[in-house]
Protein backbone atom coordinates (compact mmCIF):
# COMPACT_ATOMS: atom_id res chain seq x y z
CA UNK A 1 0.00 0.00 0.00
CA UNK A 2 1.42 3.37 -0.96
CA UNK A 3 1.78 6.22 1.51
CA UNK A 4 -0.88 8.19 -0.39
CA UNK A 5 -3.41 5.35 -0.14
CA UNK A 6 -2.54 4.86 3.52
CA UNK A 7 -3.06 8.57 4.20
CA UNK A 8 -6.44 8.46 2.42
CA UNK A 9 -7.45 5.38 4.43
CA UNK A 10 -6.39 6.99 7.71
CA UNK A 11 -8.35 10.12 6.81
CA UNK A 12 -11.45 8.05 5.98
CA UNK A 13 -11.19 6.17 9.27
CA UNK A 14 -10.83 9.39 11.28
CA UNK A 15 -13.79 11.03 9.51
CA UNK A 16 -16.02 8.00 10.00
CA UNK A 17 -15.16 7.67 13.67
CA UNK A 18 -15.59 11.40 14.24
CA UNK A 19 -19.10 11.27 12.82
CA UNK A 20 -20.08 7.89 14.28
CA UNK A 21 -19.18 8.24 17.95
CA UNK A 22 -20.85 11.56 18.82
CA UNK A 23 -24.17 10.69 17.18
CA UNK A 24 -24.10 7.13 18.52
CA UNK A 25 -23.34 8.18 22.07
CA UNK A 26 -25.91 10.97 21.88
CA UNK A 27 -28.60 8.47 20.87
CA UNK A 28 -27.61 6.15 23.72
CA UNK A 29 -27.61 9.01 26.23
CA UNK A 30 -31.05 10.08 25.01
CA UNK A 31 -32.35 6.53 25.42
CA UNK A 32 -31.00 6.39 28.99
CA UNK A 33 -32.57 9.78 29.71
CA UNK A 34 -35.94 8.70 28.33
CA UNK A 35 -35.83 5.49 30.38
CA UNK A 36 -34.91 7.43 33.53
CA UNK A 37 -37.73 9.91 32.99
CA UNK A 38 -40.25 7.11 32.39
CA UNK A 39 -39.02 5.21 35.45
CA UNK A 40 -39.35 8.31 37.60
CA UNK A 41 -42.89 8.96 36.37
CA UNK A 42 -43.88 5.32 36.95
CA UNK A 43 -42.47 5.42 40.48
CA UNK A 44 -44.24 8.69 41.20
CA UNK A 45 -47.53 7.18 40.02
CA UNK A 46 -46.91 4.09 42.16
CA UNK A 47 -46.32 6.18 45.29
CA UNK A 48 -49.47 8.21 44.60
CA UNK A 49 -51.53 5.02 44.24
CA UNK A 50 -50.03 3.53 47.40
CA UNK A 51 -50.77 6.65 49.43
CA UNK A 52 -54.50 6.15 48.96
CA UNK A 53 -54.64 2.42 49.68
CA UNK A 54 -56.95 1.27 52.47
CA UNK A 55 -56.37 -2.49 52.42
CA UNK A 56 -53.45 -4.85 52.41
CA UNK A 57 -54.86 -6.72 49.39
CA UNK A 58 -55.06 -3.56 47.29
CA UNK A 59 -51.53 -2.52 48.34
CA UNK A 60 -50.24 -5.95 47.35
CA UNK A 61 -52.03 -5.72 44.00
CA UNK A 62 -50.61 -2.27 43.25
CA UNK A 63 -47.12 -3.29 44.31
CA UNK A 64 -47.25 -6.45 42.17
CA UNK A 65 -48.46 -4.47 39.16
CA UNK A 66 -45.69 -1.91 39.64
CA UNK A 67 -42.99 -4.57 39.99
CA UNK A 68 -44.18 -6.37 36.85
CA UNK A 69 -44.33 -3.16 34.81
CA UNK A 70 -40.95 -1.95 36.10
CA UNK A 71 -39.33 -5.27 35.20
CA UNK A 72 -40.87 -5.37 31.72
CA UNK A 73 -39.81 -1.78 31.06
CA UNK A 74 -36.29 -2.48 32.30
CA UNK A 75 -35.89 -5.54 30.06
CA UNK A 76 -37.32 -3.75 27.03
CA UNK A 77 -35.18 -0.64 27.46
CA UNK A 78 -32.06 -2.69 28.22
CA UNK A 79 -32.52 -4.63 24.99
CA UNK A 80 -33.06 -1.43 23.03
CA UNK A 81 -29.94 0.21 24.50
CA UNK A 82 -27.86 -2.95 24.00
CA UNK A 83 -28.89 -2.98 20.34
CA UNK A 84 -27.80 0.66 20.08
CA UNK A 85 -24.38 -0.21 21.52
CA UNK A 86 -24.12 -3.10 19.05
CA UNK A 87 -25.00 -0.83 16.15
CA UNK A 88 -22.45 1.74 17.31
CA UNK A 89 -19.76 -0.94 17.48
CA UNK A 90 -20.61 -2.19 13.98
CA UNK A 91 -20.53 1.32 12.54
CA UNK A 92 -17.24 2.02 14.32
CA UNK A 93 -15.50 -0.98 12.79
CA UNK A 94 -16.72 -0.48 9.20
CA UNK A 95 -13.84 1.79 8.19
CA UNK A 96 -11.34 -0.75 9.48
CA UNK A 97 -12.80 -3.49 7.28
CA UNK A 98 -11.83 -1.54 4.18
CA UNK A 99 -8.38 -0.88 5.61
CA UNK A 100 -7.82 -4.57 6.38
CA UNK A 101 -8.96 -5.53 2.89
CA UNK A 102 -6.45 -3.08 1.38
CA UNK A 103 -3.47 -4.28 3.42
CA UNK A 104 -4.23 -8.02 3.30
CA UNK A 105 -2.65 -9.76 0.32
CA UNK A 106 -5.11 -11.52 -2.02
CA UNK A 107 -5.53 -15.23 -1.44
CA UNK A 108 -5.20 -15.14 2.35
Image (tube, rainbow, N blue to C red):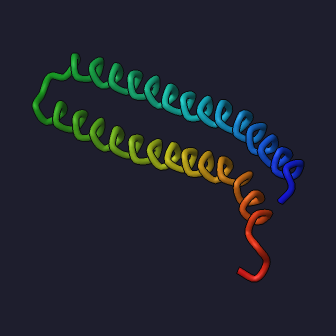
Location of residue 108 with respect to 25 vertically, above or below:
below
Image quadrant in which the C terminus is located: bottom right
In-front residue for pair 104/79:
104
Q: Would you say 96 lies left or right of 71 here?
A: right
Identity of the residue furthest to the bottom in this view: 107
Which residue occupies 49% across, 48% down?
82
Tag count in the figure?
0
Q: Position of residue 38 (x, y in %)?
A: 45, 27
In-front residue for pair 104/36:
104
Q: Position of residue 33 (x, y in %)?
A: 50, 25
Q: Position of residue 65 (x, y in %)?
A: 29, 39
Location of residue 97 with respect to 77 vertically, above or below:
below
Identity of the residue furthest to the right in this view: 4
Image quadrant in which the N terminus is located: bottom right
Identity of the residue furthest to the left in this view: 56
Q: Would you say 14 lies left or right of 85 here?
A: right
Q: Would you say 59 lies left or right of 9 here?
A: left
Res. 48 image quadrant: top left
Which residue occupies 41% across, 22% down?
41
Amino acid sequence: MSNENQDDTNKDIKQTLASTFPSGFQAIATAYGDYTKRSFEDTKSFVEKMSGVKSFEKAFEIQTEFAKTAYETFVSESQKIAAMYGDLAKRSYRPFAGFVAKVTPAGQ
